[in-house]
Image (cartoon, rainbow, N blue to C red):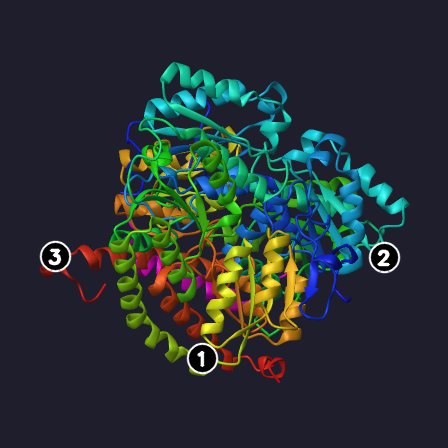
Amino acid sequence: MLLRHTPAEQVEREALTINSAKTCQPVGAMYAALGIHKCMPHSHGSQGCCSYHRSALTRHFKDPAMATTSSFTEGSSVFGGQANLIEGINNIFTIYDPEIVAVHTTCLSEVIGDDLVQIIKKASDDGKIPKGKRVIHTNTPSFKGSHVTGFSNMTASMVSYFSHNSGSKLKQVNIIPGFVEPSDMSEIKRITGELGIKSILFPDTSEVLNAPMDGKFHMYPKGGTKSEDLIKTGDSYYTFALGNTASGAAAKLLDTKCKVPYDILNLPIGVAATDAWIDAMRRAAGVTVPESLQVERGQAVDVMTDMHQYFYGRKVAIAGDPDHLLSLTQFLTDLDMKVTIVVTGTPVGPKWEKEIKALAGDDVKVKSGLGSDLFYFHQMIKQDKPDLIIGNTYTKYIARDEGVPLIRIGFPIYDRVGHQYFPIVGYKGALRVMEKILTALMDKQDETAAEESFELVM
Amino acid sequence: MDGILSKRTGQIFKNGVDTHVLECDKASVAGSVSQRACVFCGSRVVLYPITDALHLIHGPIGCAAYTWDIRGSLSSGSNLNRYSFSTDLREMDVIYGGEKKLYAALNELIEKYKPKATFVYSTCIAGLIGDDIDAICKKIETETGLRTIHVNSEGFKGTKKDGYKAACEALFSLMGKGAPARSAPFTINILGDFNLAGETWIIKEYYKKMGINVQTCLTGDGRIDEISSSHTAQLNVVQCSGSMTFLAKRMKEEYGIPFIRVSYFGLEDMAAALYDVAAFFENQEITARTKALIQNEMSQYYPEITKYRKELSGKKAAIYVGGSFKAFSLVKALRHLGMETALVGSQTGNKDDYEYLKSICTEGTIIVDDTNPVELAKFMKEKKVSLLIGGVKERPIAYKLGVAFCDHNHERKIPLAGFEGMLQFSREVYSSVMSPVWKFTSKREDYHE
């Protein structure tokens, strides 16, 4: 038993996080920044942070993740990181030639109190930022929020640095996809295209972190939202923010700054959430839903019907990020499964917990923020064994020890491929989630069935 | 030079062409995509394999999250080290200090797990807000009687090497308890093997066959009790010299234990390591057994290894690893496979290391210190290499270029040390270089002309 030191009995912990269900803000900011075309994410802090984030993203996507660091020394920690950042900006533009440098802070530079607005201004005044190029920043103190907060902050910074209301509205919408996979981002674009709606998706990591192998090393792969499009987001007539935690802040800021009205919707995972999103877009754009999407929807519903007997009443424990968890809880409930445990390390507060309860029922064990880690998740699982676990790679220890099938959804996934290429959003995504659930449950059934009840047709 | 930061030109050296002294031991240039990590990372990787200790990371959550079970160091017993414990410092802790939280966390943990010892790692923030971790550790020790050791690993206080040093200090502080110094005959400590994919077990088996006792391995499959008595050994055999030479020197000063540097990678170095250890003890039986062991292993593995030579012969390789000592062995091991090293570098090599590298590499080999993906890609292309040996961040760069890859870092899944390790290594290299996937990448044709 890998986690044999985890007892079932739960004791209140005040000062300790064991087997975290989140990580820190900067990695989210780095991921978001990689979704801007020709952008170099820059970590303003110690070298280790940047190295860890790049390793984490590389392990998850199996693709190079480029980012630079201010390489703090003891000196910078005493006297501030201004000199390092200005030298860094100069070096980055000289050698790596990006269009944009997206700086995020770390706990170290936050506590020192580096004023990034002032430092970037000084870099600009000193002529370190070439004409036509930009340096943007966001604050990502690691001791607040989580990786999702960092993603949200960097996305909001794209609005504050780029979005511009030129006075003439363009016939296009903005879509903020949230902390989802590159595959999900392309699927969101595809569905929007099917609807015949012109859109700007930001950030967009498709073809950045799932780039093709072409025999070359591309410092800046083909994908990413272009800066001219980021500017034009201020002229769009509507914004759809998918997932409140990761995308809400940017949508609200766009409204305040450029008067672009918005809708904050759940991530379109599952049929109901996809319906809600497509319906909202249909109404805003005044288009009709094409037959192609109706077919996709029908196919998803078909599988829900066909396989209901395998979903019905099965208990599921899920750990992950708040926006994913909300939509997954909805979807699993619609499949007639019973969501029993929902855990996120991201502090999201009682409103979110209430929403989960509204979907899954009052007896669901839901926890977020303080004390909400995978150790707690495991203890809950020991107390009430589910039929299925949904979570990131780290939940595999629990799945193995408890003999419960696992499907991997979330961040990070270090031990499987697929998430980079196959979406879980939209109707096709709903199909994929169902396929994964069914395969996991049925494999388990086949493995453990007695000979006489081993079934050929399922 | 195109694509190279002007401040970095001193850290790049063309063997037999350039005349400057290769610069190293420098802080990375701000703004570069360095592959290096921090002080904390250095300490964490060295101490992580100690299986029956509690490892508590005092800082915001990230430092614990990114180092949770990332090293493939295997354990034959306890798995406590595979848990991730963090004080998860929040905003209020940063303002008012984290000492109270640390004290409470240690109490909760020690009560729950009753570990042999606890390592408390300080991080950037712990250092910056000025928590008196030493005082808390002392208090806990007095109250519980259990060893509680502060690892001085604030991320910004130097490079990864300083983190190794902090880890060595922590290890040293555990020693000298119990038995008197140097009591056991023919007893060694293995320093700098981390039991990745079970490598320590292979090496221990060799020593056993030679009639040599291994008191402890620092730190592969490590145990606190064994480490506490490691001062009883008569010889320290240091492999990963970058991380462990400091500790070997400390043990020599304090306990008079001599040390030798060895490498367990490649046939020559593996055999030399065992002969050197045997020679130290000047015992005829040990010498005879060592000879027999090596002959036996060689005859078992050498013929199979040479089979891979045929197709690999003449191909070029690139190496970019953390410590330079490993690079030496790899250059030699590749030569066994008929491959020349055209590009070699490390994150933390020192002047002597690079001088030695120059002496074993051929003319034209590019030697780099603290390099980055742009330079790596540029030189790999320039040299038309067929293979890159590196770690997690280098792997996708090689693959995108259509170049084969061998992981010689934390993520290796099969043991590469020892005689059988050389066979595994040959297989790894061969299977990646000869993979049928390369025929689908047309661009690679131009790359290799």
Q: Amino acid at mark 3?
A: Ala
Labels 2 and 3 positioned on one and the same chain: yes
- Residue B40 image offset from top left, x and y in percent: 55, 38
Taking the image as shown, residue A89 lies to the left or right of residue A336, namely right
Q: Which mark is residue A132?
A: 2
Residue numbers of the magenta segment: A287-313
Residue at image position (69%, 46%) is B27
Q: Is residue A359 magenta?
A: no
Secondary structure of residue under mark 1: helix
Chain at numbered mark 2 = A
Residue A145, above or below A435: above
Answer with mark 2 or mark 3, whichever residue precedes in sequence: 2
Secondary structure of residue under mark 2: loop
Q: Is residue A151 visible?
A: no
Real-space Cα separation, disc 2 to disc 1, in angstroms: 45 Å
Q: Which residue is mark 3?
A: A450
Identify the main secondary structure in magenta: helix
Chain at numbered mark 1 = B
Q: Which residue is mark 1?
A: B436
For the image, the number of numbered tags is: 3
